[in-house]
Image (spheres, rainbow, N blue to C red):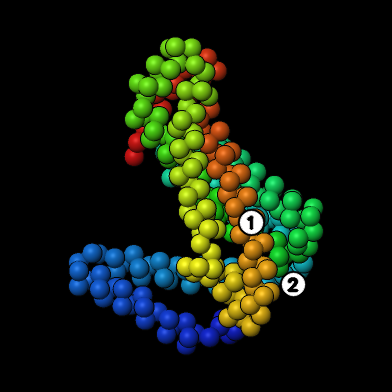
Amino acid sequence: MNQVLNDLDLGRIAASLALVVLAGLLSRVQRVGLVPELAWSSVRAFIQLVAVGYALQFIFDADTVWWTLLLLSIMTTVAALTSAGRAKGVPGARRITILSIGTAVVLTLGLVLLLRVFAFTPRYIIPVAGMVIGNSMTTCSLVMARIRDDLDAGRDHVETALALGASGRCAARPTVTRSVRRALVPIVDTTRTVGLIKLPGAMTGMILAGASPVDAVQIQLIIIYVLVGGTAVSALAAALLTSRAFFTPQHQLLAPLLVKK
């Protein structure tokens, strides 16, 4: 840990906090009440990133499959629990998020390795998997919350469709379609406008680190396509599992479990 801290340019990091301090001052003037939250989130980010930097350095030096798989398992579990916490009232929310995010990670990394886009080394796999897991976590939260709320608000329409002989899957299909489309809006819009409105994080980081723009573009394109695929997989899996969770095998809507926070 000391080595990681010694390698950090604490002066530059402290200087960059000026913007956070400015935001805190504006918040205080406007009485928004964000000062404690900004302060705690900034301190927490520093601690977490330094700890992650130390862990990654250890894993990179070890260069073993098992440490890599362990870290990916921890990341997936934390993401799944976080996403499930945003989907209160969804039956089996934790199971749904673990399966959805896990499926996205396995499929995307499996294809990346099978097609030899990246080699199975911690330096490549962990950052890519982290981005897939992060985007999948957010997407699952949006999909599950949307389906929960739409089924709750449109309960009468769903139960009418069921009474007319529709299956639970057919009755929930409009809700599932809307939830997936809306959850994928951020990643789709980012893909459409990449390079026109902003330079993505991976590309910016490589350029700042001294890589050529062409090399940075190549890596960024790979990452974007992986993220789009992984996010879509997690959204579809979460939508399918969530819609099923709200219906019994007899195609009855589990209305008592639809709880809003």
Q: Are marks 2 and 1 in contact (CB under 8 Å)?
A: no
Q: Is residue 37 visible?
A: yes
Compared across the picture, whether 67 is left or right of 133 comes to right
Disc 2 versus disc 1: nearer the observer: 1
Residue at left offset 35%, top offset 36%: 260
Residue sitting at the far top: 164
Q: Quarter-wise, where is residue 146 in the image? A: top left
Disc 1 is placed on an element classified as helix
Between the C-alphas of marks 2 and 1, the distance is 29 Å
Amino acid type of the residue tagged 1 in the rendering: Tyr
Residue 113 drawn at (x, y percent): 77, 55
Question: Which of the two residues, 203 or 35, is positioned nearer the viewer here?
Answer: 203
Image quadrant occupied by the C terminus: top left
Q: Is residue 39 above or below residue 142?
A: below
Total numbered badges shown on the rendered structure = 2
Residue where numbered disc 1 is placed: 225
Q: Amino acid at mark 2?
A: Asp
Where's residue 175, x and y in %? 45, 32
